[in-house]
């Protein structure tokens, strides 16, 4: 039997200690990782923006792999409705800041990893100072304003950015600002109109989808850290995963644009701007109130609608959410015509019966009061103008109803 001084000497001339060899053994023997790759991981500092559906798998896999320092930015707290996909949190962490909750799980998984938490909104004021402390940034956020902010900040600080997104059954991943590749702005010089952006809170998302995309983001990060020229880092290419069809596709995307406002030849953006103004949306997927787009006369508040209900005034309540959302919960006596079907012939026929034959007001309802405005506009194009005044949309929708009138309404 050997004494412990002999055992210690096995590794004294090597860079990894016994415990690290034991922990990372399967990873160490993987081609192209080795001691050198493990040392690079140990020395790496990675910032993850968002500790939600994508951020959780990214953080857990990078921690498990032995990335030396993980930074986590998130302003939100854990809710029960997060747990179906945000698997770095626990029921017992409900109400706890997400970055603290995730850092605690990282510690339990691999106590060798250091964490730095930023329980704050990542904004133009904070981004550069935070990013400067790291080598690579992972965008695991869920809104357009943050995507532009993170991308611009990475260009200005010269950091590679591993970007992911997921919605419903699909997800995408790519790497920006790496080895002369494009940045987010090269691809999308102008943001999409705020009202056209589908959110996870409207469209839904499955846990395994964010799990796949987050895992791919972690893998691209490991490849960037590994810095092997043979590695096919996903720069200038976009990997798209369609989970429903079980298909992965990788497509070429625009290369770096000489005309890009931030990474091009003559950049006009040399410091961070106001991204909420630029995108006309918040640094949050769901917090923003929907702007009024229809005339005042066509708007009904949830309080006004509640008064109508109390006074038993006859009316039609028309919910324009998708059928599957209507089936989860709805207000009593409401009809459902999904927005996609609203200007179809039989829908308009039905609405005409309500406004013309029955002479009833029709109140349009959706989750947040966005699609119900579209519905009013679409219907007005199809019915006689003398009935237009009978149409109103309910501002703030069912979220407003749950907030101001009936907190027991099970809105998701
Ligand atoms: N600018 C930002 N600063 C800090 N954290 C951000 C910023 N933008 C997004 N995030 C965080 O990114 C995470 C994205 O996670 P995810 O998409 O799973 O959704 P979520 O906001 O928890 O969703 P929901 O509330 O709809 O269930 C959230 O935890 C959110 O707080
Ligand atoms: Zn660019």
Image: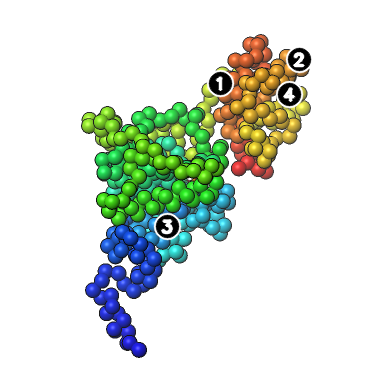
Of labels 3 and 1, earlier in sequence is 3
**Would you place residue 44 above or below residue 352 in this image?**
below
Q: Residue at x 58, y 28 (%)?
A: 371
Question: Can residue 342 be seen from the camera position used here?
Answer: yes
Q: How far across and down, in percent of the image, does residue 116 sit?
A: 37, 56
Question: Can residue 307 be seen from the camera position used here?
Answer: no
Of labels 3 and 2, earlier in sequence is 3
**Would you place residue 257 above or below residue 78 in this image?**
above
Q: Residue at x 42, y 57 (%)?
A: 61
**Would you place residue 267 above or below residue 376 in this image?**
below
Mark 4 element type:
loop
Q: Does the closest atom of ligand 1 sit within 8 Å of the Cβ of label 2? A: no
How far apart in space, not on screen, are marks 3 and 1 (Cα)? Answer: 47 Å
Q: Are marks 3 and 2 in contact (CB under 8 Å)?
A: no
Mark 1 element type:
loop
Q: Which residue is mark 2?
A: 357
Q: How far across and down, in percent of the image, does residue 269 sit?
A: 28, 33
Q: Nearer the viewer, mark 2 or mark 1?
A: 2
How far apart in space, not on screen, are marks 3 and 4 (Cα)? Answer: 54 Å
Mark 3 element type:
helix
Q: Nearer the viewer, mark 3 or mark 1?
A: 3
Q: Which residue is mark 3?
A: 61
Q: Residue 294 — which label?
A: 1
Depth check: 223 or 405 in front? Answer: 223
How far apart in space, not on screen, are marks 2 and 1 (Cα)? Answer: 25 Å
Q: Are marks 3 and 1 in contact (CB under 8 Å)?
A: no
Q: Residue 315 — which label?
A: 4
Along the horizontal axis of the image, is 50 left or right of 402? left
Q: Quadrant of the N terminus?
A: bottom left
Q: How far across and down, in percent of the image, does residue 185 sit?
A: 34, 34
Q: Are marks 1 and 4 in contact (CB under 8 Å)?
A: no
């Amino acid at each position: 039997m050997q004494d412990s001084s002999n055992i210690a000497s096995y590794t004294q001339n090597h860079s990894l200690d016994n415990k690290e060899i034991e922990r990372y053994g399967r990873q160490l023997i993987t081609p192209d990782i080795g001691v050198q790759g493990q040392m690079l991981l140990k020395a790496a500092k990675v910032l993850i923006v968002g500790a939600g559906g994508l951020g959780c798998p990214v953080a857990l896999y990078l921690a498990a792999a032995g990335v030396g320092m993980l930074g986590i930015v998130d302003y939100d707290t854990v809710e029960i409705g997060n747990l179906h996909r945000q698997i770095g949190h626990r029921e017992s962490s409900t109400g706890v800041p997400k970055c603290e909750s995730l850092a605690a799980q990282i510690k339990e998984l691999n106590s060798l990893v250091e964490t730095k938490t930023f329980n704050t909104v990542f904004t133009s004021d904070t981004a550069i100072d935070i990013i400067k402390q790291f080598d690579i940034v992972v965008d695991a956020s869920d809104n357009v304003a943050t995507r532009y902010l993170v991308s611009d900040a990475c260009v200005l600080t010269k950091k590679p950015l591993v970007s992911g997104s997921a919605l419903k059954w699909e997800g995408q991943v790519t790497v920006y600002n790496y080895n002369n590749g494009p940045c987010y702005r090269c691809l999308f010089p102008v943001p999409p109109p705020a009202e056209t952006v589908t959110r996870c809170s409207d469209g839904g998302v499955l846990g395994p989808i964010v799990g796949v995309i987050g895992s791919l983001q972690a893998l691209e990060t490991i490849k960037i850290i590994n810095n092997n020229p043979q590695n096919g880092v996903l720069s200038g290419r976009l990997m798209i995963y369609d989970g429903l069809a079980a298909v992965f596709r990788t497509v070429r995307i625009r290369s770096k644009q000489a005309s890009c406002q931030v990474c091009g030849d003559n950049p006009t953006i040399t410091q961070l701007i106001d991204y909420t103004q630029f995108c006309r949306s918040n640094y949050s997927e769901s917090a923003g109130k929907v702007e009024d787009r229809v005339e005042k006369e066509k708007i009904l508040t949830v309080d006004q609608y509640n008064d109508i209900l109390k006074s038993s005034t006859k009316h039609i309540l028309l919910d324009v959410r998708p059928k599957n959302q209507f089936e989860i919960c709805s207000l009593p006596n409401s009809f459902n015509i999904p927005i996609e079907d609203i200007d179809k012939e039989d829908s308009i026929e039905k609405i005409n019966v309500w406004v013309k034959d029955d002479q009833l007001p029709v109140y349009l309802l959706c989750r947040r009061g966005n699609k119900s405005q579209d519905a009013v506009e679409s219907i007005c194009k199809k019915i006689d103008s003398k009935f237009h005044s009978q149409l109103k949309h309910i501002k703030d929708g069912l979220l407003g109803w749950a907030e101001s009138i009936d907190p027991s309404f099970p809105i998701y």
